[in-house]
Image (cartoon, rainbow, N blue to C red):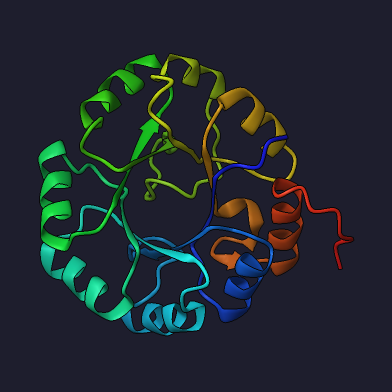
């Protein structure tokens, strides 16, 4: 298995989880600012977590249809390296956010079939990164983090020269197949390393990252 260029563990809320993520070679950590999510952190909490992480990892602020005021508060307090827009933000909104805040933008898009990939192409040249997640189950409150996967082989229909991050239902059991069959340059994981919704398991984080980065140390 080839090690992805970008390895992101999302929905962190404790110093211990951050230390596990950084210690085992993840390149990015995600902090979620969406109150309906069990992984939501306040701006004050996120600022403390960001300070703990320092410059040891790239920090991603994950928002859902956030307005400029909320984004400004996050940027000022947390100092993220990237902004992830995980809602229904338009191409114009992506442009606005990039222009206003001067940070790279990850546009997250929910997919289940080829028609969703066609829609995603309108963001090419606008978003700095693409993140493809599974469409949430009917009636779900969360746009991501639902532990649901999609058919990774449909990614064969995505332009080969536009790299992307794969998300949605990734875990220890399926990560090898996901990387092999999707061709993604990056992976994003949240619920797959949790003991319950929103509660990160540092043992699972270490085990997962050691597998992905092809380290052969024994898991404690």
The answer to whether any part of residue 40 appears in the image is: yes
Q: Report x, y in % for residue 147.
A: 56, 44
Left-right relation of 101 to 27: left
Residue 151 shows in this picture: no
Dividing the picture into quadrants, the one containing residue 159 is top left
User: Which of the pair 202/21 is nearer the observer?
Assistant: 21
Q: Residue at x 59, y 58 (%)?
A: 26
Q: Is residue 207 above or below residue 35?
A: above
Residue shown at 33% from the left, 22% from the top: 116
What residue sits 40% from the left and 68% below the top? Answer: 40
Q: Which quarter of the figure has residue 30?
A: bottom left
The residue under the point 73% across, 34% down is: 1
Rendered position, 127 above or below 25: above
- Image coords of residue 163 (percent x, y): 42, 32
With respect to residue 192, does 58 lie above or below?
below
* Residue extending farthest right: 218
Picture coordinates of residue 17 (x, y %)?
61, 72
Tell me which corner region of the image, top left, top right, bottom left or bottom right, holds residue 136.
Answer: top left
Along the horizontal axis of the image, is 150 left or right of 178? left
Badge count? 0
In percent of width and height, residue 176 lies at 71, 35
Q: Can you say which quadrant of the picture contains the C terminus?
A: bottom right
Is 32 situated above or below 43?
above
């Amino acid at each position: 298995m080839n090690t992805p260029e970008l390895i992101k563990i999302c929905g962190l809320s404790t110093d211990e989880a951050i230390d596990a993520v950084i210690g085992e070679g993840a390149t990015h950590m995600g902090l979620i600012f969406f109150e309906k999510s069990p992984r939501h952190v306040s701006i004050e909490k996120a600022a403390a977590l960001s300070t703990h992480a320092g410059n040891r990892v790239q920090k991603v602020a994950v928002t859902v249809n956030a307005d400029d005021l909320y984004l400004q508060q996050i940027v000022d307090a947390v100092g993220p390296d990237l902004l992830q827009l995980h809602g229904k933000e338009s191409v114009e909104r992506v442009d606005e956010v990039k222009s206003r805040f001067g940070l790279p933008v990850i546009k997250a898009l929910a997919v289940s079939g080829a028609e969703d990939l066609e829609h995603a192409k309108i963001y090419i040249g606008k978003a700095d990164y693409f993140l493809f997640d599974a469409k949430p189950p009917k009636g779900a409150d969360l746009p991501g983090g639902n532990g649901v996967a999609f058919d990774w082989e449909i990614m064969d229909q995505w332009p080969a020269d536009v790299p992307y991050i794969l998300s949605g239902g990734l875990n220890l059991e399926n990560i090898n197949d996901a990387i092999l069959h999707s061709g993604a340059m990056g992976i994003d994981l949240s619920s797959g390393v949790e003991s319950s919704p929103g509660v990160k398991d540092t043992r699972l984080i270490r085990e997962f990252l050691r597998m992905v980065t092809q380290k052969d140390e024994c898991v404690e």
